[in-house]
Image: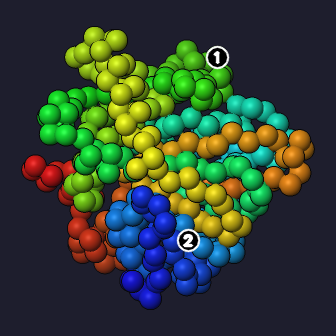
């Protein structure tokens, strides 16, 4: 409980449902936001139930969770509100496989950028009767379950990532198909620790071991690929998994430092009118509001301390 919220663990290895909250009334209430951010870091993902959000309140809430990232694919941005991407299987543009299936592979949002996403949220406007789930895995629990020898082997390793480099495997959608030729010629590599310490909590996570990794620094190509394959298999074990089936009004949000996810591929709604899927997506980077200085009180410390205090903690 926090700020009068009813937060209940899901009947799943991780995740929690939040009841009794109307984000149209309290999109930026500090007590509510503090409780939600704590719950997010504790449970990895939250489903805030029974929302009827208007777009302004949704964006106000999104800004509390970090700095919204304008999606690179212009075609899916909401025209009046570029912080929001419209995803799903309805409308003319969703007939394009690269747009409709762009997230149908295991990945971590923006792991191909220097400053990746810190949280991603999807608000469900239309829910399919069947299919269209978001599959998630808890990469902190997956790290914790490793034996000490493997933890020692992984500590300090650095992974090279680029857009969709490891998509298209194991029957997953190949995200590189959505790149324009110009984008394909300008893909750059970025580097992230394989074992990432959570900015707020310092908990270690097997970070982004699928979707974007090209290889591991200092390891021969095949050796790095083999280790990444093993780790991907490990994090996808049922013990660490939760598949979310949306109901209209769900606002699902996940901690991208502590999870990986994949959309379940879905046909275009014209082929299957009972199964329409329409979600408003906001992905954020950087600190959520409780970890940012309060600009209305110059000199005041953030309510919950500095973002990255966890990552900086010696021994974490
Ligand atoms: Fe994603």
Residue 179 figure quarter: top right
Task: Decide if residue 171 is in sight here.
Answer: yes
Question: What colour scheme was applied to this rendering of the protein?
Answer: rainbow
Dot 1 crowding, Cα within 10 Å, few <14, some 14–19, many 20+ = few
Query: Which of disc 1 and disc 2 is earlier in sequence?
Result: 2
Q: Is residue 63 left or right of residue 192?
A: right
Q: Nearer the viewer, residue 82 or 169?
A: 169
Q: Residue at x 58, y 56 (%)?
A: 244
Q: Residue furthest left?
A: 314
Residue 121 figure quarter: bottom right
Task: Decide if residue 160 is in sight here.
Answer: no
Q: Is residue 286 left or right of residue 304?
A: right
Per the image, label 1 sits on a secondary structure element best described as helix
Question: Which mark, by number, is residue 48?
Answer: 2
Residue 211 drawn at (x, y percent): 48, 31
Report the residue marked by disc 1. Answer: 181
| Cα distance in 3D space between marks 2 and 1 | 39 Å
Q: Nearer the viewer, residue 93 or 141?
A: 141
Residue 122 figure quarter: bottom right
Ligand 1 closer than 8 Å to label 1 CB: no
Residue 84 drawn at (x, y percent): 63, 54
Q: Residue furthest bottom?
A: 4
Residue 259 drawn at (x, y percent): 42, 49
- Residue 131 to residue 64: above or below: above
Ligand 1 closer than 8 Å to label 2 CB: no
């Amino acid at each position: 409980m926090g700020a009068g919220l009813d937060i209940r663990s899901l009947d799943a290895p991780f995740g929690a449902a939040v009841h009794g909250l109307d984000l149209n009334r309290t999109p930026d209430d500090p007590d509510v936001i503090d409780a939600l951010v704590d719950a997010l870091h504790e449970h990895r993902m939250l489903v805030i139930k029974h929302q009827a959000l208007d777009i302004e309140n949704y964006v106000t809430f999104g800004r509390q969770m970090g700095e919204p990232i304008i999606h690179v694919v212009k075609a899916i941005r909401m025209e009046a509100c570029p912080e929001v991407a419209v995803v799903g299987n309805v409308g003319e543009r969703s007939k394009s496989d690269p747009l409709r299936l762009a997230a149908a592979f295991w990945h971590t949002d923006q792991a191909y950028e220097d400053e990746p996403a810190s949280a991603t949220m999807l608000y469900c406007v239309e829910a399919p009767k069947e299919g269209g789930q978001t599959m998630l895995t808890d990469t902190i629990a997956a790290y914790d379950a490793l034996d000490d020898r493997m933890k020692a082997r992984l500590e300090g390793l650095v992974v090279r990532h680029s857009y969709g480099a490891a998509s298209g495997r194991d029957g997953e959608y190949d995200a590189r198909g959505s790149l324009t030729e110009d984008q394909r010629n300008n893909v750059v590599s970025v580097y992230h620790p394989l074992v990432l310490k959570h900015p707020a909590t310092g908990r270690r996570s097997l970070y982004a071991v699928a979707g974007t990794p090209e290889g591991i620094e200092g390891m021969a190509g095949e050796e790095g690929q083999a280790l990444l394959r093993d780790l991907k298999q490990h994090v996808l074990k049922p013990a660490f998994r939760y598949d979310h089936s949306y109901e209209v009004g769900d606002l699902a949000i996940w901690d991208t430092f502590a999870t990986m996810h994949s959309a379940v591929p879905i046909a275009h709604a014209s082929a299957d009118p009972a199964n329409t899927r329409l979600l408003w997506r906001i992905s954020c980077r950087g600190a959520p509001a409780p970890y940012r200085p309060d600009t209305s009180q110059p000199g005041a410390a953030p309510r919950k301390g500095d973002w990255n205090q966890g990552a900086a903690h010696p021994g974490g």
